[in-house]
Amino acid sequence: MRGRQLRRAAICLLVIVAVVPVTACGSGQEAVDRPATTRDDGVRTDSSAAREAAEKAALEAYSGYLAASRTASRRSDPHAPELSRFLADPLLTRVQLSIRDAKKHGAVRTGTLASDPSVTIVSLDSDPATVEIQDCLDATGYRLVNTKDQRIVPGSGGGRHLATATATRYPDGRWLISSGSAHPDQPC
């Protein structure tokens, strides 16, 4: 009788050990699948909806930043208005200085820059709220070209590499890309 009880206890312990790690280590969908809650005044709140809205707005700002910087670089216009529509300092100033420096040396960026961004962290409780973005940029077709003879500037070729960016929600509700880094030493 005692042996049977020990076996049952061991089986129960095995079941608990096998189940707990599975439920503790989820796929990240738990927050998305959580049902919406209702406040006392009957208004529906949904933290997953807020998270999804933040992710969407941040990715739109990131996409806008890439498009605006490509356009401004192609036109050699460091003060293109579309830059400030998607960027905030300190990244805005870094991008403007980079475009101004290329213009000073008689060069513009041309070609295609492929992007495949994804959200890695959403921090809606931080002040200000932020969203971290990771991207695999393909700059193999994106070159710095001399404006006089259309020759590629030596050493300006790119490859596929990791890039990271932070989108920040500003008091007016806009999401702007405030920082970013290319990691050419980390291919993707």
Image: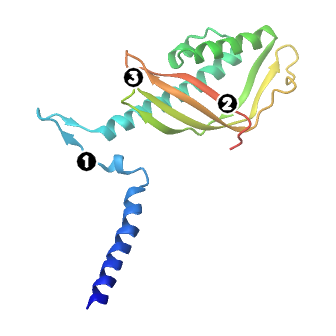
Label 3's element?
loop
- Compared to 3, does 142 lie above or below? above
CA gap, disc 1 and disc 2: 38 Å
Residue 127 marker: 3
Q: Position of residue 113 (x, y in %)?
A: 68, 32
Identified at 63% across, 20% down, the residue is 69
- For residue 65, which quarter of the picture? top right
Q: Residue furthest left?
A: 41
Look at mark 1 in the image and give the residue it sits on: 35
| Image quadrant containing the C terminus | top right
**In the displayed structure, would residue 134 be above or below residue 21?**
above
Nearest to the observer: residue 97 or residue 63: 97
Q: Amino acid at mark 2?
A: Ala
Q: Position of residue 177 (x, y in %)?
A: 53, 23
29 to the left or right of 74: left
- Tag 2 or tag 1, which sits nearer the N-term? 1
Which is closer to the viewer, label 3 or label 2? Answer: 3
Observer-nearest residue: 138 or 17? 17
Q: Is residue 76 visible?
A: no
> Looking at the image, what colour scheme do you see?
rainbow
In this rendering, does residue 23 appear at all?
yes
Q: Secondary structure at mark 1?
A: loop
Q: Quadrant of residue 9?
A: bottom left
**Residue picked out by circle 2:** 182
The earlier-in-sequence mark between 3 and 2 is 3
Report the quarter where the N terminus lies.
bottom left
Locate residue 133, reporting x and y percent: 53, 34
- Residue at 69% from the left image edge and 18% from the top image edge: 73
**Which residue is drawn at the image coordinates 62% and 8% (left, top)?**
79
